[in-house]
Amino acid sequence: MIDDHAHRIHLAISYIHAHFDQDIQLADLAKAAHFSPYHFHRVFTAIQHETPNDFLRRVRIERAANLLLIYPPFPMQQIALDCGFKSQALFSRAFRNHFGMTARDWRKGEQWTLDGLSYNWRQQSHKNNENILQDSKNCKVPHTDKLIESIPDTQLQAALEAARNGELPRQISGLKFEKMPNYRWVYFWQNGVELEQMFTLWQRVAHWGQAHGLTNANSSLVSRMIDNPNVTDHQHCAYAVGLLVDAEFKAEPKHLVAELVAGQYLVVDFCGTVADSMILAEYVFNYYLPQSKWAFDESRPGHTLGPIKDPQEILVTSTEFTYKLCVPVKKRR
């Protein structure tokens, strides 16, 4: 399911996500991926369609964009430093170049439009839909900023508004704060979170689990958004799906194995379509969590836990999924 090069590039990506606030050199990433610097740069660019330097810059900017939304009162200079920028001036310039607006305007939250199954920040004037050359130390790679038209959906808009105002969505059957243990999982990842791409990955993971004796009797399906699809372009957005395994499971060298970190979580029982998950997020993050004594803990990634789908089932937009959304939380200051 995952070739050796993709596996090793993911090791470098994980290194970036863990150390983006530090000074990262090409040699550091090459070492993490077990490549020579020259070979690493070439392979990374081929797989990710952006250079390591462009990728690191984007991760830092998008991390800052998330923090600006999560912590409105937090000083902008501190966010810039925490995300690896040497000064607020450098951060401000990079932010405007990437998002087409200032960080202060971004923080106001007036840029969002509903766009299918996520919110979209892109403005019609942003980069004029032209190919942009992103400079790096070793080469220049062209990128197209694809503009996506907003898709109006009055029924979804009404449901989102109701959830935002505190009406419990029918798709949610339970919410509770609880301490969860460590879990071990084997996972696979991809760039791209369009529906067809996610459905394909879920089915491939289910097939892999079936071949390795992992069923709903002894495992669960885990999914995790590595990037925020409301902020990151959908084709750059990294997504991981895998299955829980016990300590005795013999992982192959090409497998990616990690821990789901123990700690306090808000656990939400959900049953609905992929589109309904927008309503879930609206209620949890814009109403329920702000009303509680807990705040979202950005230092730990969230995930979902659910049953493994039949690998033969054909997944469509109306397919309903049952899962637990596990949101890491910490005591509010």
Image (tube, grey):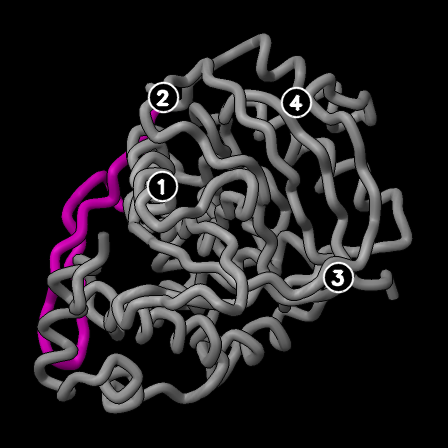
Question: In the image, what residue type sits under mark 3?
Answer: Pro
Q: Residue 160 carries which label?
A: 4
How dense is the environment of label 2, judged by Cα within 10 Å: few (below 14), some, or many (20 and up)? few
Which residue is at 17% across, 61% downward? 3
Disc 4 and disc 2: Cα gap in Å?
A: 29 Å
68 sits left or right of 165 in the view: left
Q: Residue 92: where, in percent of width, then height?
A: 47, 67
Q: Disc 1 designates what residue? A: 210
Quarter of the figure with residue 295: bottom right
- Is residue 233 highlighted in magenta? no
Please report whichever mark, 2 or 3, sits nearer to the chain's N-terminal start.
3
Mark 1 element type: helix
Can residue 193 be seen in this snapshot? no
Q: Is residue 64 depicted above or below 35 in this figure?
A: above
Q: Quick check: 201 left or right of 102?
A: left
The residue shown at (74%, 24%) is 163
Q: For mark 2, what is the residue?
A: 313
Question: Residue 90 or 78: which is nearer the viewer?
Answer: 78
